[in-house]
Amino acid sequence: MSEIHKFLFNGLPVRGCVVRLTDAWVEILRRRASGNSQAAYAEPVQNLLGEMVAAAVLMQSNIKFNGALVLQIMGDGPVKLAVVEVQPDLAFRATATVLGEVAQDSRMSQLVNVNNLGKCAITLDPKSRFPGQQAYQGVVPLFGDRHEKLERLSDVLEHYMLQSEQLDTTLVLAADGRVAAGLLIQRLPLEGVNNLAGSVVSQANEDEIGVNEHYQRIAILASSLKRDELLNLDVETILRRLFWEEQLTLFSPAPGDAAPRFACSCSRERVGRMILGLVLQEANSILAERPEIEVGCEFCGVHYRFDPIDVTHLFKTGAGLQA
C-alpha cells in the first residue's frame, strides 16, 4: 500500500518526510496503458511523472492548506505538459501530454526543455475562496542560476523552494513502473506558517539560508540515498541507514489520516457543464458529424458520451445528467 511518514530531528530545526507510492502509482499507469486513445508512457516520461507525483504529495503533506496543490511542467520537447494534482487528503491524479517520439535514454531537458524554455509551476487552489481571491502560483524555469539546463526535477523544486519560500530543502526522488518515491528534508522556518502557504520571511530566517550546520549535515546524508535504495527499501530501513547517528522521532499516522491514493475528480456532471460552455449550435454541429459527443478524461481514462437526446436535455435543464 502507498504510505507517507513524517519525522523530526530531535532538538534541531529540521524536518523530514518519506513517501512511497505503490498501488496508487501503478493504477495511474494501468489506466494510461488501457486507454482507448492513448499509449502507455515511454519509460523516461513514466519516471519523470512518477517523480512529480512523489514530490507533489510530499509538498502537499507539509502544508496546512484546504485546497489542491497542482504541480505542472510546461515543456518545449515531446512532453508538452505534465500535471499532478494532490488534494488535502492526499488523493491525487496525474497525466502527461506527449507529442512526438521519446528516446529511451531521454534526460529531463530532452523531454521538456529542449530550447531552455520549459517552466515548472506550483499552484495552490483553495476549495473556498474569498471574494476576489485568486489561486497562489509560483513559476520557475528549468534552468539554474547560470542558465544551465537542469536534468533533475529535485534540483528544479529545491530552487523553487529557496527562491519562493526562502527555505532550504533537499529532495531525493525516484520512480519506475512499480514505485514512485521521495525523501524530503527541510530546514524549519524561524517564523511564520508552513512553506508554500504564505510564510512570514524574517531577516533572521534569511540569515540562516544555506548556513545552518545541522541542516547542512543532514542534507548531505540525505543526498547520499541512491535511486535503488529509495525504490526498494522500506521507510524504517532508509532512515536507519541514512541517519543512524541522529536522534529522530518518526510519527505514526494519526487516526483518520488518509494514505496517499489515486482518485479522479472528473464526473459526468462536470463534463456536462463543459458542453454547456458551447452554444447549442456548436454542439449540434459536432453531432452532425458523429453520433455523439465523446469526452475522455486525461487523468483517469473514463469516457463520457452524450447523444443528441442527452445534449437536448442538457441545454433545456442547464444541468449535467446522472451517470
Image: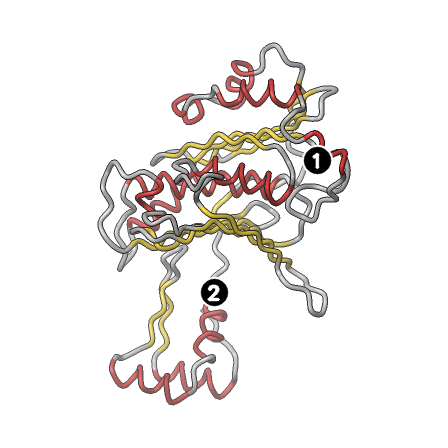
Q: In the rendering, at what x and y percent does residue 265 appear?
A: 50, 59
Within the image, what quadrant is residue 298 found in?
bottom left
Toward the viewer: 40 or 123?
123
Per the image, the residue denoted by label 1 is 206
* Badge 2 amino acid: Ser
Q: Residue drawn 69% across and 45% down?
A: 64
Check residue 267 in the rendering and tell me which mark sits there, or answer none: 2
Q: Residue at the spot x=57%, y=52% of the render?
A: 138
- x, y percentage for residue 147? 43, 42
Rendered location of residue 72, percent (x, y): 47, 51
| Image-based side of 116 in relation to 206, left or right | left
Q: Secondary structure at mark 1?
A: helix
Give the number of the mark in front: 1 or 2: 1
Circle 2 sits in a helix, a strand or a loop, which is it?
loop
Query: Looking at the figure, which quarter contains the C terminus?
Result: bottom left
Decide if residue 24 is in sight here.
Answer: no
On the image, which quarter does residue 6 sit in? top right
Q: Tag count in the figure?
A: 2
In the image, taking residue 242 as reference, residue 119 lies left or right, namely: left
Q: Residue furthest top?
A: 245
Marking on residue 281: none
Q: CA distance from mark 1 to mark 2?
A: 45 Å
Identify the coloring.
secondary structure
Position of 42 with respect to 16 (left or right) is left
7 to 92, vertically: above or below: above
Kindly tell me whether residue 119 is visible in this rendering: yes
- Badge 1, how many Cα within 10 Å: few under 14, some, many 20+? some
Which sits earlier in the primary sequence, circle 1 or circle 2? Answer: 1
Q: Amino acid at mark 1?
A: Glu
